[in-house]
Amino acid sequence: MRHLRVAAAQLAARPPGSAEASLDAIGAAVQEAADRGAEVVVLPETIYPGVARGRADALDALPPTWDAAVARLGEAARAAGIYAVVGMARPGGDSGEPARNLAALFDPAGHLAGSVAKRVLGPLDRGAVRPGEETAPVDTTLGRLGLLVGGDVDPPEVARGLAVGGASVLLVPAARALAGDPEHPDDLDVDVMLPARARENATPLVVANRVGTERSLVRYDGRSAIYDIDGSRLAMASPDRAEVVVADVRVGGMSARRILGADFPLPRVKLGRHRRAVFAAVAAGPDHGSWAQAARTLRAAILVAPRAPAGEPPEPWLARVGDGRALLALPGKAVREIARTATWRTGHRVVEAGMATLGILFAEEVRAPEPARLCMAAGAEVVVLFAERIPSTEAIAWARARAVENRVAAIVASRERGVLIAPDGRILAAGPRRESFVASAWLALGETARKSAVPRTSVRPPAL
């Protein structure tokens, strides 16, 4: 067993058109890592050219300088004399070659030694980039290096395949968005999932993330980290500033093959999202802009906003609800049903909305249990609360309680902030207070199937 000094370079999100500044920041971070003795450094996902992961509109605006950028990054690695793993968005070619979200490995001689394309695509990648194929670790003078990109580390199979293939370290450029409430960050990734990947494969793991907010759509979580073979965290960056963290990890210890057993086959798993999940977003803030454009950018199936912006152009999939000030964007058919208010089920505000069944509440209605309970009994899987007239802190607390007791997901739309809540009451995503922001998350509707009510009461869900 030997030690390898590794580094994670955490860099700030940049607006579109900042490719040149991104290259300068990457070069400076690579040199800093080398000055601190690192032999390999990892930089965030799509940090060149700095777009928000693989969004199509950003990819269309990529500068036509791919070869020049590769040369610049190779020169940065050569000048520093270390290996550098850089998250890069590569545009599609004129010959029909698809756009890719890559982890590119540059060696100390300045050559592009290998690259892998992201396999597990998130909402901001789908439709913009093509997923990668199964890959092997890259052979280097440091050993075999396993490259992953962002969400590839979420399911166990990708990291497992690389470890079984002989990877001595797992290197992960990431663009991990803040999960849950920014005032109380969710530590599931950094405290549970990432150390589990290192520990279960007896392979150190380095993840580099971004910080900052991009286009009022994504707030990055920071906390880039280095984990040893036993899952212990050796170093972690801050949640809100650019910096480089360095640590010595152990390599060449117990292999994943020994953990599995020499003849135990690695199962082939088709990766994809849960069939009963819906991607939802909620907008808030004083400068609300165009919610329709936000929904197009995110490709959300449900978009909720507390107020309909003045002068919003008519769209076939937008509907004003309640007193006309709130806005709900859904598949077109569902919106047409909402417009014909007779489709509210059994007199309650419940509507079939394509991928989900929604119940709608307004302000003070959340303070009593009956409105949400009746929505649940009528089949609602998601309760949408328009909470303009009550404080957001109170609205969120009530919505979490209603979510748990009715086993429904909840979306809170208020002027101060938007929040998405899981059926178990967890805050999945939340915008910062009094800032224009569109929070988004997957709502796992399969979790809403288990309903319960006290026997011999007037509220009985239809399928108890």
Image (tube, rainbow, N blue to C red):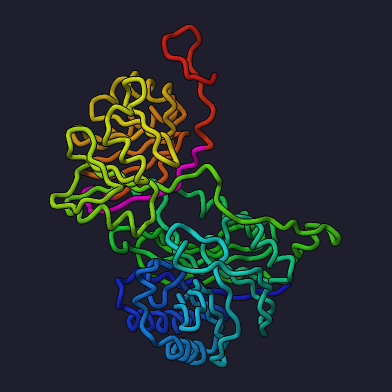
- Image quarter of the C terminus: top right
> Residue 437 magenta-drawn?
yes
- x, y (%) of residue 345? 36, 24
Find residue 254 and report its image quarter.
Answer: bottom right
Residue lying farthest to the right in this orientation: 263
- x, y (%) of residue 293? 28, 58
Q: Residue at x 37, y 20 (%)?
A: 374
- x, y (%) of residue 194? 57, 57
- x, y (%) of residue 453? 48, 17
Q: Is residue 8 left or right of residue 427?
A: right
Is residue 247 positioned above or below 122 on the image? below
Find residue 91 and report its image quarter.
Answer: bottom left
Front-lying residue, 130 or 22? 130
Front-lying residue, 248 or 337? 337
Q: Which residues make up the magenta segment?
A: 432-445
Is residue 148 positioned above or below 193 on the image? below
> Residue 162 magenta-drawn?
no
Q: Is residue 138 left or right of residue 308?
A: right
Q: Residue at x 61, y 56 (%)?
A: 271
- Image quarter of the N terminus: bottom right
